[in-house]
């Protein structure tokens, strides 16, 4: 919920240098940042009119305030908050144990890890490194070159080499890899949308979650949904938080879209529902007795990020809070790929304020300190939503930072995803997860691939700024 006035409050920090501010300050005492120049956040609202029957106006790359949204390059999309203003820097959380972020170079985001080493010791957070696969094994082969195999009924296929069968002891008969626990590796394909989530090579559990689904609008046309959530590792029960958020957002969309609610409004409401679901975990009676009697439990309450996409009525609607992302990749690559979200993060703030270049910001150890999340200890909830009407068919990649750390720019994502992603979304999601694991797999990796089809006679531009 956006504040009514843009005045520093007790505990808030400067958007320029992150120094503490006093209530009523007009300028930062440390760097001189003009606090009055920053526009007040505005309530999130649909770009287009809401009503039934479903007869929505054309979106032209607009954000939640109705402003044109140039999205040809990563980071160009307005919408760091619902009114297009700078993000609040009043609170920061790390998507990982503080001090546990590996060093980075200007060309690699700060939470990207080097290739996992068999000799690396366990880290202080309780996670561990797994031995890298033998370069000559089927696991190390380019996943794009491995055709999916359909196993006989009742036989499980290895999630590593995707060729061998799994024996009764849980090991692959082809490559010998032990199979993960159910949540360690999850895959789901539902019609034209698919998602894959993997624990990665260094974490001891998977704290990501996803939901994919489809329904029908009042006019009978389909609406396809993809939700991806990333648990905040420094919080308690991050795996529960991400699962609760993904489920709540998905259920809300399946409830409101068939009634004719505009997809952008439905996405906003879905994020609010996800936030309430995560907040409820902070007071869940199932927590330990120590947590129940801890007056400071909200300071480290369950938390996660969220990003979602809805393809409905010829529109593509994106919603998010945090640093999980959505990318657009045209099928024929005739148009530019684009990043459709802007991170709620320290690095994004520094770049937006003109204080650092993108390379400098993401090389800093504070780069992945997130400034927006779902959780009882979040400073305020500001769902971001944006609407688009593409003029050509393509796919939407909805993912956590466990993937985009290894394909940060939209062009990188377009080069990584297979050319036939629209026809084989599950295989494409598997390829993207494999790309992250091949790059080091330092984090949980979750990605959903949602094809967006435009009839041949469609007109208009996906990147129309008018």
Image (cartoon, grey):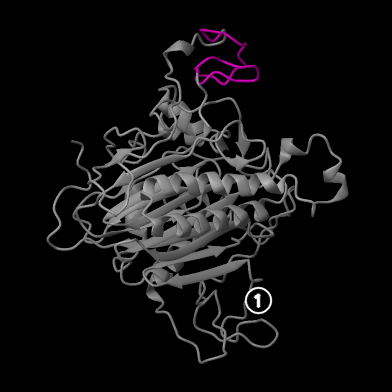
Residue 225 appears in view = yes
Question: Image quarter for residue 298?
Answer: top right
The structure residue drawn at horizontal position 60% and vertical position 20%, both measured from the top left corner, is 12
**Residue 231 at x, y = what percent?**
61, 50
Q: Main secondary structure of the magenta part?
A: loop
> In the picture provided, is 221 more to the left or to the right than 227?
left
Residues rendered magenta in the picture: 5-28
Count of labels shown? 1
Residue carrying label 1: 178
| Residue at the farthest front position | 52
Quarter of the figure with the C terminus: top left
What residue lies at 60% left-to-right and 14% top-to-bottom? 21
Residue 373, image x and y in percent? 57, 40
Name the residue at 51% across, 77% down.
161
Q: Secondary structure at mark 1?
A: loop
182 with respect to 347 (left or right): right
Residue 65 x, y percent position in the rendering: 35, 32
Would residue 349 be found to the left or right of residue 177 on screen?
A: left
């Amino acid at each position: 919920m956006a504040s009514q006035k843009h005045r520093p409050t007790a505990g808030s920090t400067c958007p320029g240098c992150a120094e503490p501010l006093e209530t009523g300050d007009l300028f930062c005492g440390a760097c001189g940042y003009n606090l009055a120049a920053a526009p007040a956040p505005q309530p999130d609202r649909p770009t287009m009119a809401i009503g039934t029957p479903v007869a929505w106006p054309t979106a032209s790359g607009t954000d939640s305030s109705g402003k044109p949204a140039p999205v040809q390059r990563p980071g160009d999309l307005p919408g760091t908050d619902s009114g297009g203003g700078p993000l609040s820097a009043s609170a920061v959380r790390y998507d990982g144990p503080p001090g546990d972020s590996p060093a980075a170079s200007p060309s690699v985001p700060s939470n990207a890890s080097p290739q996992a080493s068999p000799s690396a010791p366990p880290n202080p957070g309780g996670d561990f490194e797994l031995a890298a696969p033998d370069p000559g094994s089927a696991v190390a082969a380019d996943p794009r070159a491995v055709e999916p195999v359909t196993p006989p009924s009742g036989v499980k296929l290895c999630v590593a080499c995707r060729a061998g069968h799994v024996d009764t002891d849980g090991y692959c008969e082809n490559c010998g890899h032990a199979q993960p626990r159910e949540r360690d590796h999850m895959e789901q394909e539902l019609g034209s949308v698919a998602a894959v989530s993997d624990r990665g090579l260094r974490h001891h559990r998977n704290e990501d979650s996803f939901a994919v689904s489809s329904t029908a609008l009042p006019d009978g046309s389909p609406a396809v949904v993809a939700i991806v959530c990333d648990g905040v590792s420094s919080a308690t029960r991050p795996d529960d938080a991400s699962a609760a958020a993904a489920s709540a957002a998905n259920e809300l969309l399946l409830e409101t879209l068939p009634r004719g609610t505009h997809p952008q409004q439905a996405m906003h409401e879905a994020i609010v529902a996800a936030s309430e679901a995560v907040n409820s975990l902070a007071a869940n009676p199932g927590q330990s007795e120590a947590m129940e009697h801890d007056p400071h439990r909200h300071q480290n309450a369950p938390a996660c990020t969220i990003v979602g996409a809805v393809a409905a009525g010829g529109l593509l609607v994106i919603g998010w809070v945090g640093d999980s992302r959505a990318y657009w990749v045209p099928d024929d690559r005739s148009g530019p790929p684009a990043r459709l979200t802007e991170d709620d993060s320290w690095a994004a703030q520094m770049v937006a304020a003109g204080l650092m270049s993108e390379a400098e910001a993401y090389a800093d150890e504070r780069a992945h300190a997130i400034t927006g999340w779902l959780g009882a200890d979040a400073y305020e909830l500001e769902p971001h939503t944006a609407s688009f009407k593409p003029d050509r068919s393509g796919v939407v990649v909805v993912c956590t930072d466990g993937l985009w750390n290894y394909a940060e720019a939209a062009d990188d994502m377009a080069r990584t995803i297979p050319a036939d992603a629209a026809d084989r979304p599950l295989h494409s999601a598997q390829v993207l997860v494999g790309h992250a694991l091949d790059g080091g797999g330092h984090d949980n990796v979750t990605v959903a691939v949602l094809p967006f089809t435009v009839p041949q006679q469609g007109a208009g531009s996906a990147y129309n700024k008018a």
